[in-house]
Amino acid sequence: MAAHRPGSPGSVERGESGTTDLVLREGGASWLTVPRSLGNAASTGLGTGLLGAALVLPVAVFVLFTGAGWATVAVVALWMVSVAVGVGFAAALLVDCFRVYRIRFSAVGDPPEVRLVRGLGSGPWRPVEEPDRLRLEQEIEEPYAGDPLPATRVLTLRLIRDDSDVCRAVLLPDTDARELLAALEQALGPAVLLELHVKRTTRPAPRRRPGPRNRGRGGPSGLGISGAGGYSCGSGCGGGGGG
């Protein structure tokens, strides 16, 4: 696994009180989250404002056809852009404030408990029940024969309770899933059930277009071939595993 700096997604941190943090995203429950969240919200608001501005022209044409003057068009345009900016800014800020940045586990030896660390602060401690589990899902897309592009990897982490997601996050693409699983096993012991699911597929080759010589001969000269993929599951924890 690539050496991730402390606090980066995919890292495992030990707190002074013996707690263990699994970092999903940078920030969370810190004043450092505020300027980042405001910046994200501002950029989102700008994008939605541009979208609102793009809709001004057809609306302005409609308003003019109703007999209203240019002053009314200006008021409607200003209202549309302002609403678009406000909605985009507020929505992005709420997402940043309430999204889960870390999963925090109680110290080893204590009754196992877990809490979610959000942008606005940490949630309450909840006991880790038997159905609770951490699942790493890695999707690997291998290149087809002759493909100049490298394989792509997507690693998703899910905290599952009663077959429903408590939270999920996509980790950095260079995160080594097995090393992260081993670090979690060492830090958490048998307190939490850990799973690793790997899905491998082959990137479909592009279809070849029929050349001039092949036209009228019953179809294209070549077909794209994609490899079959499937899940291979592994699991591990001190108290048992699931696949």
Image (cartoon, rainbow, N blue to C red):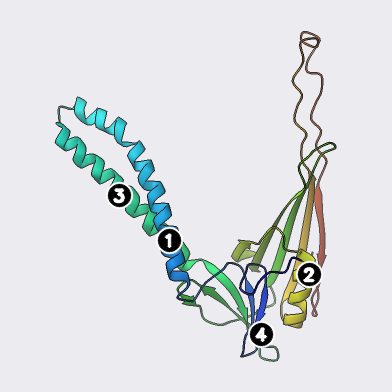
Residue 162 in view here: no
The first of marks 3 and 1 along the sequence is: 1
| Residue for point 76% across, 10% down | 212
> Considering the numbered disc 4 on the image, is that residue within a helix, a strand or a loop?
loop
Name the residue type under label 2. Glu
Residue 83's disc number:
3
Q: In this view, does 83 lie above or below 184?
A: above
Contact check, label 3 and label 1, Cβ < 8 Å: no
Residue type highlighted by circle 4: Pro
CB atoms of marks 2 and 3 within 8 Å: no
- Looking at the rendering, which quadrant does residue 168 occupy? bottom right
- What is the CA distance from the residue labelled 2 to the residue labelled 3? 47 Å
Residue at 64% from the left image edge and 75% from the top image edge: 6
Mark 2–mark 4 distance (CA, rounded to whole Å): 23 Å
Which residue is under mark 1? Answer: 39
Tell me which numbered mark, 2 or 3, is placed earlier along the sequence: 3
Q: Where is residue 242 in the image (x, y as percent from the top left)?
A: 78, 68
Q: Which of marks 4 and 3 is nearer the N terminus?
A: 3
Viewer-proximal residue among 171 and 159:
171
Residue of label 4: 112
| Separation of marks 2 and 1 at Cα, in angstroms | 33 Å
